[in-house]
Amino acid sequence: MEKGDFRLCDVVLDDTIGRSTPDVEHERAVAIFDLIEENSFTPIGHSGGPYRLNISLADSKLVFAIATEGGEAVATHILSLTPFRRIVKDYFLICESYYEAIRSASPSRIEAIDMGRRGIHNEGSQTLKNRLGGKIDIDFDTARRLFTLVCVLYWRG
């Protein structure tokens, strides 16, 4: 199987939740663009894609619905949001500080806040990668971009 077969070709966030602030919408657009440009995505036990991923929230759970490029259902994985609550809350708080800082703070203050923001984002990304273990094999960069999208959904939901 070629490496290109195990990748995402499309990512859709549940639109029923609505839109958010311009900063959040920008994060979403960049994460989806970067994710489609470069990712590693292997649903365990499936022979190959590329894949379409629909991410949504249902009953306070995270839903990853995977289909082939042609629309054939591959798998749906439902994850509890409980392991993400503290991380996402901390991430939102530091993002608010970051967006405020880039408007008025010194470069060293912005850099310090951004380092903290990246650290929390990495923690959330690793948590997502671990939670998907045995279901979907992803690399860390793919986990980072997917975690950004989880945060956007969470923020809007």
Image (cartoon, rainbow, N blue to C red):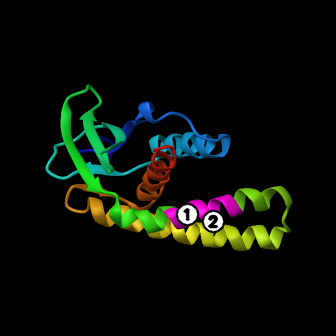
- Amino acid found under the numbered disc labelled 1: Tyr
Q: Give the total of numbered labels.
A: 2
Residue at image position (19%, 38%) is 74
User: Is 21 placed above or below 15 here?
Assistant: below
Packing grade of label 1 (10 A; few <14, some 14-19, many >=20) is: many
Magenta range is 89-97
User: Is 110 placed above or below 155 here?
Assistant: below
Residue at image position (49%, 68%) is 122
In the rendering, at what x and y percent does residue 156 appear?
Answer: 50, 43
Residue carrying label 1: 91
User: Is 21 placed above or below 154 here?
Assistant: above
Name the one closer to the observer, 66 or 37.
Answer: 66
User: Which of the 4 image quadrants contains residue 6?
Assistant: top left
Residue furthest out toward the top: 70
Q: Secondary structure at mark 1?
A: helix
Q: Which mark is residue 56?
A: none
- Amino acid found under the numbered disc labelled 2: Ile
Q: Secondary structure at mark 2?
A: helix
Task: Work out how far the residue at label 1 is from the one at label 2, CA to CA, in angstroms.
Answer: 5 Å
Name the one closer to the observer, 107 or 8.
Answer: 107
In the rendering, at what x and y percent does residue 123 appear?
Answer: 46, 70
Q: Is residue 37 left or right of residue 104?
A: left
Residue carrying label 2: 94
Q: Are marks 1 and 2 in contact (CB under 8 Å)?
A: yes
